[in-house]
Image (cartoon, coloured by chain):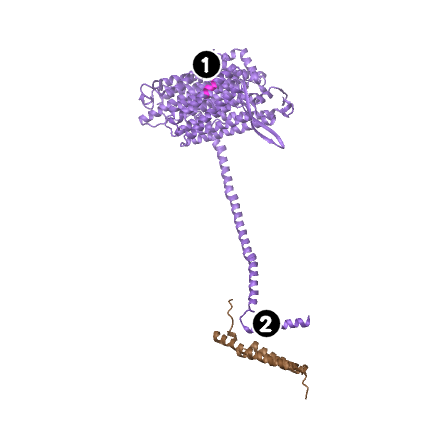
Amino acid sequence: MHNLALWALVLGVLPLLAFILLGLFGKKLPRHGDWLGILSTGLSFFLALYLFFQVWEKQVVHVSWPWFQLGGTGLKLISFKAGIYLDNLAVLMLVIVTFISALVQVFSVVYMHADKRYPYYFGYLGLFTFSMLGIILSDNLLLLFIFWELVGFSSYLLIGFWYERDVAVKASKKAFLFNRVGDIGFLLGIFTLYALFQTFELPSLNAYFTNLSQHSDYITFQIPAQLGLDTNLEVSHWLLTLGGLGLFCGCIGKSAQFPLQVWLPDAMAGPTPVSALIHAATMVAAGVYLLARCFSFFTPDVLFMMAILGTITTVLGAIAACAQYDIKKILAFSTISQLGYMVVGMGVGAHDASLLHLVTHAFFKASLFLNAGIIIHANHQAQHLTGLHTDEQNIRNMGGLRKILPVTFYAYLPAMAALIGLPLFSGFLSKDAILSGAWAWASLQSSKGNYFYYLIPLLGFASVLLTGFYMARHCFYIFFGENRLTPDRNAFRRSPAKEASGLLLIPVILLAILSFGFFFSINPFHYTESWILQGISRLTTSDAPSGLAGNLPENISHLVHQSGYISLGTGIGSVLLACMGIFLAWTSYKNWMQQGASPDNFTTGTFTRLAYHHFYLDVFYERFLIAPFLYISGRVAGFDLNFIDYSLNILGKAIVILAKIIGWIDRMLVDGLVNFIAWLSGIIGKLGRLTQNGKIQSYYIFSLLGLIFLVLYIVFF
Amino acid sequence: MIEIPLTHILVLGAILFCLGLLAVITKRHAIVVLMGIELVFNAANLNLVAFNQYQPDLMGGQVFTLFVMVIAAAETAVALALVLKVYQYFKTVNLDQIRQSTED
């Protein structure tokens, strides 16, 4: 078992090695080192596969090493350990992350060709992969937080990779800062847990959350006696809720939930493969992964908040996607919406469904982003060849690519179908799972008579409709009709025979193939037989029951099993809604074509404008948070400059004056005293010198006087 | 014979001495100073002769006086030689102008 942990360590460190080597020697390597990045990630992928087959459904690996100590002589010694924890979820995520990272790097070989910072790009991707693997492998929250921050930093490097572009620089800063806001809450949550239980380690914390008894407003934990805590620790409910909300904050920031989702659309300023890796498959999934790991620590109140925020995010993201014209922004808002689904899944207790959706989403969304990359690349080439310069990412400038880039189109279709949730595709299974779970949750919660709980699954269904709409719209504008840039179809293709480089197409095709439902469940219509789902469910049922949430997950899955019509209903309902969405998109597209298909017609309706501007959230933040803060900082800076610096200058001047006074004293009095003594001795000397005046007669007088005194002395004394 | 009290002769000697001293101290001319020294000598001679009465058979006072005169004469010769040399150097006999130049 120790061996496996060491292999996991090697797996994690390989991309870091690539980062270091590429950073130091990148430009000197042949081909600028892209093979080094791909090789390291590829090796990590094979190690991940090996670990997967060793750990999945077989064992759980947990190894930790001493890390650092605080305290010691005189103070209580606290030691911290760092370790690796491998269970079903971890090895699954390892495979996904390394696989998609490797594919993205292969894709980038062509996409980022001849970029002047080419080796650093692969280095940053290696750093990112390392950080993400670190999050997955960590066994304690402190270590996870370190990697969490590192992931945020890597994404800052990658989003702002083309730093000459002002848009990219701003976007990278925005992403990092909004992540940081979430991380504040995350830290507070970690601190709460530590303050209560004196440990960061996830397996230990999960163990504590199994032996508990709930009371009206406090919860009693059974703690093993050797830790020096009360064996029956009583913790108030609201403290645990706050801690759980704190942990959730980390997810809000990283996984772009409302209200912190505004960084994700702007992050599209980075290179497209980066968007595929970070903002589709991995980094944004880190938040959901965190929720899965910390699932036992969430009180029902926190879970309810999760469900609400997740629903809001889903709906907002879907609405905003309907009014966008940038090929990547639509996918970005779609990601926000799908992440909302995952968080809703967690909130209603269907955590396994949520994780299944994470897995399927990673594949089809990465495929869609890479697909968009091919299209952007082709458009770029076409613009070079024809000399026209328009916005290459505006879908109103595209069209007809179905016939021009057929392989791309056929690779697009499965991914799109999976995202919309059509049967036989992977997305259908995971969406169905979440929606059924949500419906079962709502019926459980509303058994007390309050039917508002049904709002959450209903809004989820509304989002399915919107998803169908915006994805179909995306598809029609890009692939159908005639091309609106140039009628020359060879301008887009690499050559008349070959539409694009194999290195671009193969990753997209591979991921598109993985969008079929076959790989996730033998039965394409029923998700409960998914082997992935069964593997992940064991996450909480065997190692650590659902902790504070009680029996919520089991109750939900039980309910869904019992009344089979829930999953049937959600399945049929979602398919119908998706088709309705596609139909509505078709009519909207037709309208636009008939109105002239101009690339500049801006949205006129208020609702559309609201959606296009992302509900003016950016404006809101700018005006009510950032501007006042900048104003305050400006005032404080002015205060510092005018008052504090001014006072210091006055003080400096006062010191100079004091020094001058002391100098005067030194000159006048001290030196004066010395000079006076010298003058005095001079005077006495002058006086004395008078006796030596060279006149004989005065010498005679003095000797005579001396004789008289001598005689007088002898006579009288 | 009228006895002259000893005191009178001593007082006369003292007056002569003081006059000679006055000349030595005050006069500018070098030769005049020498004359003043002569006066001092002679005042001492007078004192010696006055005390001769206490040794009449040996006549010590008078003999001593003769000795003093001889020495005075020798000394005057030497002094005059000195004054001559000084005059050759300083080109003057004015004592105010004869001084060793001491740097202030």
Q: Which chain is brown?
A: B
Q: Main secondary structure of the magenta part?
A: helix
Residue A48 lies in the magenta stretch: yes
- In front here: A519 or A36? A36
Q: Given the image, what chain letter belongs to the residue carrying mark 1? A: A
Q: Given the image, what chain letter belongs to the residue carrying mark 2? A: A
- In front here: A39 or A441? A39
Q: Give coordinates of residue B59: x percent, y percent.
A: 65, 82
Residue drawn at point x = 64 percent, y = 71 percent = A710
The stretch of residues the image draws in magenta is A44-49
**Would you say A10 lies left or right of A551 here?**
left
Q: Is residue A320 visible?
A: no
Residue under pointer 1: A519
Q: Colour of chain A?
A: purple
Neighbour class for label 2 at 10 Å: few (<14), some, many (≥20)?
few
* Badge 2 amino acid: Phe
**Would you say B1 lies left or right of A293 here?**
right
**Would you say A507 lies left or right of A233 here?**
left
Q: Give coordinates of residue B37: x percent, y percent.
A: 57, 78
Sequence-first disc among 2 and 1: 1
Residue under pointer 2: A702
**Would you say A495 lies left or right of A632 here?**
left
Secondary-structure class at tag 1 = helix
Neighbour class for label 1 at 10 Å: few (<14), some, many (≥20)?
some
Q: Give coordinates of residue A225: x percent, y percent.
A: 64, 23
Q: Is residue A18 visible?
A: yes
